[in-house]
Amino acid sequence: MKVKADLHIHSCLSPCGDNDMTPCNIVNMAKLLGYDMIALTDHNSCLNCEPTVKAGKKVGLTVVPGMELCTAEEIHCVCLFRNVKKALEFSDYIRSTMPDIENKPEIYGEQIIMNSDDEAAGYEKKLLHLASSVSVDELVGLVKQYDGACFPAHLDRSSYSLLSVMGFIYPELNFTTVEFTPEANVESFYESNPLLREMKIVRNSDAHYLENMIEPVQELDLPDCSAGSLVDYINNK
């Protein structure tokens, strides 16, 4: 089946995410825009995934639990999971790899943990904007240990992308899927990175504000509209 999906959206848990990016606001905006599936991918944390998954079920929208991980090299990668349990286990592990630096809300923004009724349930005190100690070389294998899948984010951007940091994609990273921004000219990257021709391309909004959420730009061919099918799609060559 064809699934309209945006696999890279932030909530108010992300330090750069707007406080209006609550579970109910996100899923209702996604429904208005015509999505079948979205993924919640806050920076280095999955703590708002469970309430957003619950909010999605109320309106008939599949919400995939996920995270935008910042690797030790400061490369952003989207990590997605079959269920909330595995996502939270991964989130706990990543938190243990983060520097023990406290967030300063007046500088970086609040990191709000929500419930499914759009009420603040707490605040993440550790600054989520920083890099973990997880290397990009180990990421695919690590995420699979948590029954998930991952891909490098916004490959065409000049910062925090695999190409901006490392200069090229090499096979040993074992990525099967990569993300470009919706406006990127993907073909312009093929000559310098021929491996891209063998990989799946996804395009996502990376929305941090409700007004950044865009109408669907891709349809994924999945057996069904589930997180498990998406994880398989990303992992399979």
Image: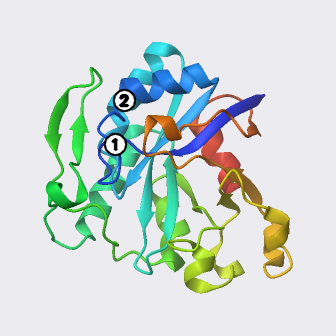
Mark in front: 1 vs 2: 1
Badge 1 is on which residue?
18
The amino acid type found where label 1 is placed reads Asp
Task: Identify the residue at image location x=60%, y=40%.
Answer: 6
Judge by depth and name the residue closer to the eye, 93 or 216.
Answer: 216
- Count residues near mark 2 (Cα–Cα under 10 Å), then give few for <14, some for 14-19, many for 20+: many
Observer able to see residue 216 = yes
Residue 111: percent from the left, percent from the top?
A: 23, 48
The local secondary structure at tag 1 comes to loop
Q: Which quadrant of the view contains residue 162? A: bottom right
Position above or below: 175 against 135: above
Per the image, label 2 sits on a secondary structure element best described as helix
- The quarter of the picture where residue 106 lies is bottom left
Q: Quadrant of the C terminus?
A: bottom right
Furthest toward the bottom, the residue is 167
Q: Position of residue 218 (x, y in %)?
A: 74, 40
12 or 232, nearer to the observer: 12
- The numbered dot on residue 23 is 2
Kindly identify the residue that appears in the image at 36 percent across and 35 percent down.
Answer: 21
Q: Residues within 10 Å of mark 1 (few under 14, many from 20)?
A: many
